[in-house]
Image (spheres, rainbow, N blue to C red):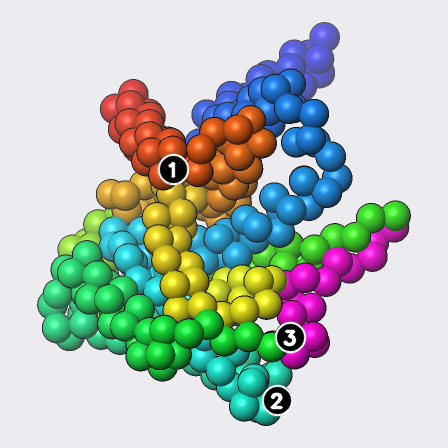
Amino acid sequence: MGKVNIVGTLSSGNWRRILSKQEFGVFLILLLLVGSLSLYTDTFLTPTNIFNVLRAFSWIAISAFGQCMVIITGGIDLSVGSVMGLSGLVTAMLLVQGVHIPVAVLAGLLVGLIIGFLNGLMITAGKLPPFIATLGSLLMARGLCYGLSGGWPVRDLPLAFRNLGQYDLPIGNVGVPLPLIFMIILALVTSAFLSRTVWGYRIYALGGNETATALSGINTNRVKRMVYSLCGLLAAVGGILMTARLGVAAPTAAQGYELDVIAAAVVGGTSLKGGEGTILGVLIGAAIMQVLRNGLVLIGVSAYWLQAVQGLVIVVAIMLDQVRKRRR
């Protein structure tokens, strides 16, 4: 009997810990959304549609991994959408000029890294609020998109590059989208970085209490520059995969995607007050936003209402986060 009681107690404790996690509640919302859409539509659960959803939210999720780290520190990066567009455009322009694919991709990644580092520099050395600094970067990066392209899309990208976003890797009897594999790998790497490294600890500490973190001897400015640089780099990865999927780089590409990226992080449980957030939550949040977008299209809701629904979801997610914190 004693053993049974101990096992039961441990099981009960484990379940309480699981049920109290933010990710569990968000995952229940995702399941409810999937279940509802599968009842209302005949096409939602088809393999083609599911893989399209997985492919489409992969670059949003990748970009949101960096946004998550920035928000954990108590900041915000509004430039991620423009960085995605500019990185993809630079890569595409180099490709049509005959530059080798690895070199062009590295150049696109470097663009994102530089913009992210400059954001961190403006915030730490220039003492600008993150909102203002990254809003300026948003406008400058988007202006570069129009200036470099003259307002015209870049077409005729090499097939080998387009395969980065369009190829399905055969695993068993199904084809798994290559962007999804990239997303899973980056999710594992980013999650390990946040949870198992000294720098990850410093990121959470900075968001929890910047003054105490600085007094403990941690260079908070260095941490901020690092997370904004990583955010720009991951946004560039997402932008390049998106460009490869579309097969064309337009100066308007990823316009407004900063809202999708921030929504994925916030809906996934990343607190805008800092100090809290997980990559698993971001993955679920990105899935919710893409499933919602896909489902509204399938049930015939006009595309003009999508942003209104997205805004409502963000507000509800933040309200629920505030209620959860007050109960603590």
Could one spot residue 224 in this view of the protein? no
Question: Which residue is at a point 27% across and 43% down the rendered structure image?
Answer: 272
| Amino acid marked by disc 3 | Phe
Labels 1, 2: front one: 1
Quarter assignment of residue 98: bottom right
Question: Which residue is at a point 35% across and 48% down the rendered structure image?
Answer: 259
Nearest to the observer: residue 292 or residue 252 = 252
Give the CA separation, mark 3 to mark 2.
10 Å
Give the CA separation, mark 1 to mark 2.
40 Å
| Amino acid marked by disc 1 | Tyr
Callout 1: helix, strand or loop?
A: helix
Residues packed near mark 3 inside 10 Å, few (<14), some (14 to 19) or many (20 plus): many
- Looking at marks 3 and 2 on the same chain, the residue that comes earlier in the sequence is marked by 2
Callout 2: helix, strand or loop?
A: loop
Nearest to the observer: residue 57 or residue 216 = 57
| Amino acid marked by disc 2 | His
Quarter assignment of residue 15: top right
Label drawn at residue 304: 1
Residue 177 lies, in percent from the top left, at: 70, 55
The span shown in magenta is 158-172
Q: Which residue is mark 3?
A: 161
Labels 1, 3: front one: 1
Q: Where, quadrant-wise, is the C terminus in this rendering?
A: top left
Residue 5 lies, in percent from the top left, at: 65, 12
Callout 3: helix, strand or loop?
A: helix
Residue 28 sits above or below residue 97 on the image: above
Residue 300 lies, in percent from the top left, at: 53, 28
Left or right side of 151 for 7 = right
Residue 46 sits above or below residue 138 on the image: above
Q: Is residue 167 magenta?
A: yes
Give the CA separation, mark 1 to mark 3.
32 Å
Q: Which residue is mark 2?
A: 100
